[in-house]
Amino acid sequence: MKLSGIATILMSGTFLATSANAFEVTSDYLNSLTGPNISWSDSTGTEVQVGDQTFYYTYTAPAGYEETSERLENDFTNDDVTNKVFTGISGTEDMNAAVMLKSMSDPVEGLEIVSDFVNNSVNSTDAAYGAGILFRATDVVADKIQGNFINNSVVSSSTYSVGPAIFLSHNNSGKQAIIRSLEGNFINNLAENTGSGYVHAGAVDNHGQIDSIKGNFIGNHAKAKSGYAVGGAISNDSLSGGAAQLGTVMGNFIGNIAESASGYARGGAIHNNSSMGSIINSNFINNKVIGNANSNGGAIYSTHNLQVAADNGTSLFEGNTVNGESNAIYMSGTSSSLLELNLTGTNNGVLTFNDDVDGSYYNINILGGSGGEVVFNQNVEHFSNLSISEEANMHMGVNANISGQSMVFAGTGGSKPTITVDIDVDKTNQTIKSGMITLSEEVSGDYSVIVNP
């Protein structure tokens, strides 16, 4: 069955008027995000490529912070990692991060790190990981990590390069690494493999548990030569020792890149291969995936259920690409395990996709209410089922092309869900343009239709 937005309009509708503007990244906008200690300009400072634009940042240490080039391993207190700038610390495979907990016999609890990590590096002919903070094979609970993570790098010529800002290990012989709250600015960090190895995460590589992340991820880069590269900013991935867990994410992901010269690349901002909570009031702007034909997920690539929401705020996907083609989210399910992509606009929150949404073996669930909207302005393709819950509002721009198998009303017969359809009326040529829903199987339910001419 094919449902045209125009056909539905002719049955009944309420007419409104709206407008939409393209989002522009400027140095003033970047300054509004990253706070007083990181300033952005169009000409002065350290160069960062953000999408197709070039910006420059200058970092100034916060007042009262002490600069140090001393590496801390295992034997340190909270005072040692408070109000510091760890900078210029270099290491190899066996001597990694500026601050690290490795293979400790006793658990660590109540850890708090409030410091900045700037210009630290790991260069190795073997594995390279965690130039800033490293928790590996250790029972550790960090209640809070807060700081600026800027221009940290891990470079390997062989096996793998992962997590230049933070590397958090998976369960190892019953040991668990946990971060309760992670907050900060993650700017211009690099994980690179110059050989045949793989790359995880341009900034944060999680194989343990992070309960919440709040931050700005700008210009981070996961770069491989012939191996794969995933997660331009964040990778959440289970390994053999146990399942990784990533909780709530709230932030701005701008100009991050996952790139492989000859292998696949996935997740320009986030690569999710495990359990993940909600992404709330977050913007994904000009993130990129560059790789072979198996590359996907300009902003987000997920092999597990995914929740994206705007709750009394906004979430925007714009300018995200895979090999130059529009893509915000790619859901990678299987025939035996369909994934759920839950999209929510509630409490006047607006979740907007100015990029394509795609995947295989996945459902889309539109949720929300109280004046919220989920807005599609481009292609939404290859879903198995599209469901719209009571009080939810799915808003289709004039270029929206929603195509999949079936569509249902997911409710108990209370308030109708709303489909808002923008139309473009050309009086001179006597034509009308609107978004379209195309379904290969069934449609069911009772919907309210609102028309925006």
Image (spheres, grey):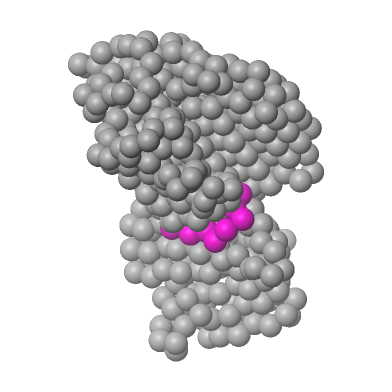
For the question of whether residue 184 can be seen, the reply is yes
What residue appears at the point 37 percent right and 22 percent down from the top-left corner? 73
Magenta part of the chain: 299-309
Using residue 59 as the reference point, say whether residue 264 is left or right of it.
right
Task: Locate residue 372, reporting x and y percent.
Answer: 40, 64
Using residue 288 as the reference point, say whether residue 83 is left or right of it.
left
What residue appears at the point 57 percent right and 58 percent down from the top-left corner? 304
| Front-most of residues 72 and 404 | 72
Task: Locate residue 83, reporting x and y percent.
Answer: 24, 21
Task: Locate residue 169, reporting x and y percent.
Answer: 48, 39
Based on the picture, tell me whether residue 234 belongs to the magenta stretch.
Answer: no
State whether residue 258 is above or below residue 356: above
| Front-most of residues 270 and 386 | 270
Based on the picture, tell me whether residue 307 belongs to the magenta stretch.
Answer: yes
The quarter holding residue 295 reads top right
For the question of whether residue 20 can be seen, the reply is no
The quarter holding residue 101 reads top left
Task: Locate residue 317, reporting x and y percent.
Answer: 53, 48
Q: In which quarter of the image is the C terminus?
A: bottom right
Q: Main secondary structure of the magenta part?
A: strand
| Front-most of residues 28 and 368 | 368
What residue appears at the point 48 percent right and 13 percent down from the top-left corner? 90
Using residue 242 as the reference point, say whether residue 311 is left or right of it.
left
